[in-house]
Image: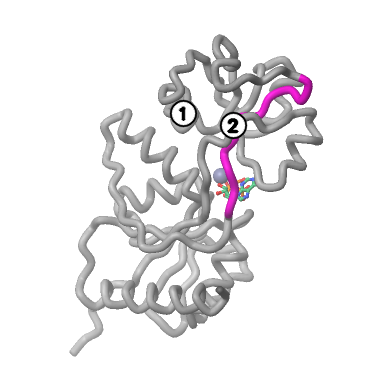
Amino acid sequence: TPNTQARLRIAIQKSGRLADECATLFKGAGLKLNLRDQRLLSHCQNLPIDILRVRDDDIPGLVMDGVVDLGIVGENVLEEERLERCATNRSAEFATLRRLDFGGCRLSIAIDKDAQYQGPQSLAGTRIATTYPYLLQRYLDNAGVNASSCMLKGSVEVAPRAGLADSICDLVSTGATLEANGLKEAEVIFRSKATLIQSTKVLDTATQELVDKLLTRINGVIQAKE
Ligand code: ATP
Ligand code: ZN
């Protein structure tokens, strides 16, 4: 019989904090890949899998639109995209296959290190710079705080010093960047790890079986480390 099985398409970050860990995970799961060159599309040599390497911000949308079958992305980026799509009546469906053991960070509100902080109400009437306006707004709504936000896609941590905002809402892992910019963490609003997600688009049987096999292998790789 002719081989009509579609190739499984998986989106991962091209370069950045998740890129090496994704490559290591796939290697551990037995995928033969050449990810050294910087091509957008890499064909797996021993399984019908194609790896698409893109900006991490593009990964949730590619999965939600069914352009790729699987993706690995930080939950922070995923949840922000989901909230934005829900707010604008666009499809935001996906299935979580597995939370992964890397990419850990927290989305936090950080304020001037010398500022007084007596809880979320201290933020009332202030402006907060962030790359995550929907996650921030959800937090402010739940806390009953009326504050404004301004979008910065980069250099968020310099916004207070530059006079663009009073405080920031940004990703933190060690806190060193905050300290270097004269800021202190006031509130953790979201805890994140990298996660493996699947499109809700129905796959042909053979391709879904490949997803199941890949997930079993990934579970094995992670359990072996615990
Ligand atoms: P891209 O070029 O793909 O858009 P980026 O600059 O947006 O990359 P990275 O800085 O590589 O993204 O971070 C990717 C993800 O790594 C984050 O979305 C987050 O989930 C996770 N992460 C873990 N620790 C940190 C941290 N200290 N700062 C930022 N992101 C972190
Ligand atoms: Zn990004």
Tell me what residue is drawn at x 38 percent, y 33 percent. 84
Task: Tell me the crowding category of disc 1: few under 14, some 14 to 19, or many 20 or more residues within 10 angstroms, Cα based.
Answer: some
Q: Amino acid at mark 1?
A: Tyr
Which residue range is magenta in the image?
104-114
Would you place residue 33 above or below residue 166 in this image? below
Name the foreground residue: 224 vs 210: 224
Mark 1 in CB contact with mark 2 (< 8 angstroms): yes
Q: Which residue is mark 1?
A: 139
Name the foreground residue: 118 vs 3: 118
**Quadrant of the frame with the N terminus:** bottom left
Would you place residue 173 above or below residue 166 in this image? below
Q: Which residue is mark 2?
A: 187
Which quadrant holds residue 24? bottom right
Name the foreground residue: 179 vs 164: 179
- The image's colouring method is one colour
The reply to whether the magenta stretch includes residue 65 is: no
